[in-house]
Amino acid sequence: MFVPLFLAAVSTAPSVVRAQQPSHAGTGPGTFEIVGKSGVSAQQLFLGNDQKVYIIDKAQNNEAQVAGHPAWATEYDLNTNQYRAMDVITNTFCAGGSVMGDGRWLVVGGNQPVTTGGNTTVPGGPDPYKDNDGGNSVRYITPCTDGNCNYSYDTMSGRRWYPTLETLEDGSIIMIGGNMFGGYVNNQGNNNPTFEFYPSRGAPQNLTILFTTLPANLYPLTWLLPSNKLLIQTNWGTELFDPVTFEEDTLPDVPPPVRTYPASAAPAMLPLTPANNYTATVLFCGGSDLQPDQWTAGLDMTQVPAQASCVSITPDVDRTWHEEDDLPVGRTMSNFILLPDQTLFLCNGANMGTAGYGTDPWTKGDSYADGPIFKPLIYDPSKPAGSRFSDEGLSESTVARMYHSTATLLPDGSVFVAGSSPHPDVVLDNTPYPTEYRVERFYPWYYQKTRPEPQGLPSSITYGGNQFDVTLTAADLNQDGATALEQTTVVIIRTGFATHAINFGQRMLQLDNTYTLNKDGSAVLHVSQLPPNPALFAPGTAWLFVVVNGVPSIGKMVMIGSGKIEEQPKLAATVLPPKSVPEGTTIPTNTTINKGDQEGAGVKTAGNVTGGAMFAAIAATVLAVLAAL
């Protein structure tokens, strides 16, 4: 019987004590810190486990070397801030990626083999990078912690450069669009207006929206919705696509500006919560207001202002677009990162121009963009309209993150930021925006708070089924009992595959929970499994956080679903027990979860606890640890 590698590792590995507090000190709330070098420029990346980030570039003259040639992939160690060069044998330039239901990460498509300067390799000519054609290449890897995993290879039927990948409800992947041989924007002769599946279900099928949205329809923005339809937004066009029947249902055009590459708005699905009945709303911010004929009209793109407009759509219940709070300034090529406190962190990008690079006389050292934005933002969807964006307490980065920049959430709740290389090959000097190897971490407001240390977290989450119970000490609850419990959430986050201002597959879902508060101030959270609908959160690995008053525990990697690519088992949802508190205790109402109060959040340390409360906290911790052994 085949046992998925992820489940085999879970079932046979010895018990390991997870870190309960961040291992990095950080530089203070709202700050960036340069922590290491990536070895290759981080055009693409994904968080593989609690120790490693996998970084992927195009074939170019990177500083990291492997097998006698420059590398274009590394495995970055989050503990040591060192990298291991990896030998990826096909050119991954502008590939797409996502995680599969068995825990493997897929990296699909790319460019033909190149030599120096990004020029196509010719038979018998120089071959310094030793790269093979990546156009129809499928690479996959099961992330490891011992430095011994490497990419394996398969192929697909046709060539895809700038493809979109989205994980489906059975854990397989749909691969959408792209073109055959690259370019700044798409065109009819270069277009690949089809979709196909991995594992393969047969020949690619045409997708109408990819015929009608040229030329800015590369990396079509795509999300699996709770209805099991796909929201696809590309150039001005928008539709719902059924991956089972292949029916396309046209929605109204997106309000200006263009959001897809190379306009490169920042998109994200907002958190799915019990309060919003797990209804999916997708937010798009920024982009470039160019008509189809303007992309190839010879404009000086560095003088095209990025736009500040934000719009959203909730397509399962409302087919109309809604205007949202504008960005403080126009942005292109920025990344939205979902944080465990249910806010969104926005970083990277520029105020002028678009994604892309070239040899045009007006470029800024090859870059089609100018005016880097160093100031991040926080977007809080729970705040009233007009006040959702804020830069309060946020410091600027010192690194220009232009074209080919990326970011991802880490298990300790910080944000890993890397990349930027708007050039056909590595350029380190005499250019305004050099190829970047510097890696930063951004530390949100909660980073240096003492974290809750929940006991009893599972290794897998099912679709329906019995609840699981999580123990919190009185100290975990800040000695605030029912008040803290009313502000405690349990969230699952998939960090996604980051490239080109998109984190493909990124989403957050809050599990339902109730609680039992004990007399000693400790508590048991009664937590539901996922609702019995795999389209809410597709199978594969993700991260589980317990968040007390806005402060997250260290995330634990969990397998969502069966760990296999298959129709997922769906169990009846369990009704959670009612909230229970000791006699005489009042359950507060109308509490607000903290999302940035520097004074009122966090877990008190033993030094803040006195007398009987300290004894109760210590005793509860000891009992919880013993129970977990």
Image (cartoon, rainbow, N blue to C red):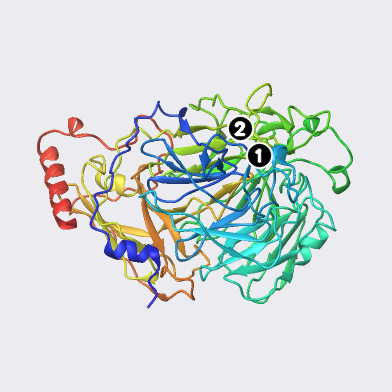
Residue 401: mark in rendering: 2
Indicate left or right for 279 with 452 as reference.
right
Q: Which is closer to the viewer, label 1 or label 2?
A: 2
Q: Quadrant of the C terminus?
A: bottom left
Whole-percent x and y of residue 270? 55, 51
Along the line of sight, the residue nearer the viewer: 186 or 274:
186
Instruction: Look at 25% across and 43% down and name the residue there.
Output: 476
Give the residue furthest to the front.
Answer: 124
Picture quadrant of residue 14: bottom left
Along the line of sight, the residue nearer the viewer: 626 or 477:
626
Amino acid type, residue under disc 2 in the picture: Arg
Task: Specify which label sits upstream in the sequence, 1 or 2.
Answer: 1
Whole-percent x and y of residue 98? 55, 57
Image vertical order of residue 138 relative to residue 264, above or below: below
Amino acid type, residue under disc 1 in the picture: Met
Indicate left or right for 378 with 206 as reference.
left
On the image, numbered disc 1 is attached to which residue? 333
Instruction: Look at 66% across and 39% down and name the residue there.
Output: 333
Q: Quadrant of the N terminus?
A: bottom left
Along the line of sight, the residue nearer the viewer: 565 or 260:
565
Element on which disc 2 rests:
loop
Q: Are marks 1 and 2 in contact (CB under 8 Å)?
A: yes
Indicate left or right for 452 with 91 as reference.
left
